[in-house]
Image (cartoon, rainbow, N blue to C red):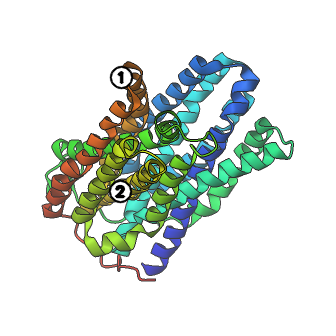
Amino acid sequence: MLVDARRARAGVFGFFFLAGFVMGLWAAGLPSLNDRLDLGPARLGSVLLLISGGALVSMLVAGPLVDRWSSRRVCWFAGPFSGLVLLGPALASSYWALVVLAVLFGIGLGVTEVAMNAHSVEVERRYGRPIISAFHGTWSLGGAAGGGLTSLALQTGVDAQWLLIVAALVVPLLYVPAARLLLPDPPAHTTASETGASSGSSLGWGLIALLGLAAFAGHLSEGAAIDWAALHARWVLETDPAMAPLAYTIFSVAMTTVRLLGDPIRARLGSVRTIQLAGGFATAGYLLVLVSPAVGGALQIVCAWTGWALAGVGLATVVPVLFSAVGAAGGRVGRALAMVTAFGYSGLLLGPAVLGYVAEASSLPVALIIPAVMAAVVALSGTPAIRTLTRLPTSTPDPDLTPARD
């Protein structure tokens, strides 16, 4: 019903903001955690790897849980749990204690990621029009809020450890009112006999692989920008240290802005055209970054910044379009969405590391050819996958699921 859809949309906004807020607190508190436990680069890298591993495994487990219990029920325990496990890094007294607690933290992040995205797909079904992109923009705003709060606390003399402890106790409580707004019952799903898929989903493994490849490529290109944009400006373009971080800032602002405003764009252009433009813009952006050193002078900075902005504009819509496509196919979305999410998360993890090895062996400009190619792969794999999805039979519409209008 219309009221349920609008309430649930507000609840999903709350989940995405709080999930981003938790990540922002964690990321911004890493320097303090490193100093407190005297970790060093190698140990800190191991901790981050364990968090990612825990998240990846839990994503694959969360998909079947969502299909069996509904995304709403999984959200109810996953959200508060993801906030509570901030106590792990906050209270860890040694590196080895942090190792165990890092896996637990990753599990909380992974289950929440799948559950809230699955519910966002169900809410979009009720609306009958694109609304998912704005959720991901809200996640970015939550991350900025968590990082900003950490910075403010440190400047006022509040220890980052105590901030994490307070957040771990307060954030789970904030998830409760958001969870109360979620859809009371999942939308009607197609049965296995209707879709021909034993899992109750319309998506076969080949189609999931195509969607996963697009997600992997998009996340790898995004991770490259997050970790290497500022370093490219400093090492390759030889900008002032104070100016170098602006490269990533421009990318991030462009991505967040388009995510917040991207739903009407997809509604007008359609998913196929949107994924094509996403790959095209991102590829063009990386090409500008690659040719910027040849421009010379002050124009090389303008060229590179324009490139990072275009990359942000293109990559902003990749995940919302792919997740929406999974939901539009009908059937149970948990298992398929978990697989696509895990593919994408793998790209976000592996990309920056692979680029580092390539840059060490050759140069950073050579390494950045990889995300440029991957940006093109977004369109090349996403386009046929989404076109195929539009031809699949979908669930029989529920007469109560009237498309919502603001």
**Frontmost residue, 351 versus 281:** 281
Horizontal side of 290 relative to 119 (left or right) equals left
- Residue at the front extreme, as displayed: 297
Does residue 59 sit above or below 362 in this rendering?
A: below
Q: In terms of depth relative to the viewer, which is nearer, 377 or 88?
A: 377
What percent of the width, then of the height, locates residue 386? 20, 57
| Residue at the extreme right of the image, as rendered | 157
Q: Do the residues labelled 1 and 2 touch (CB within 8 Å)?
A: no
Q: Name the residue under label 1.
A: 362
Q: Looking at the image, which residue is at 43% across and 40% down? A: 223
Query: Secondary structure beneath disc 1?
Result: loop
Q: Can residue 338 be seen in this view?
A: no
Q: Is residue 37 above or below residue 240?
A: above
29 with respect to 190 (left or right): right
Residue 2 in the image, given as x and y percentages of width and height: 44, 80
Q: Residue at x 20, y 48 (%)?
A: 381
Identify the secondary structure beneath mark 2: helix
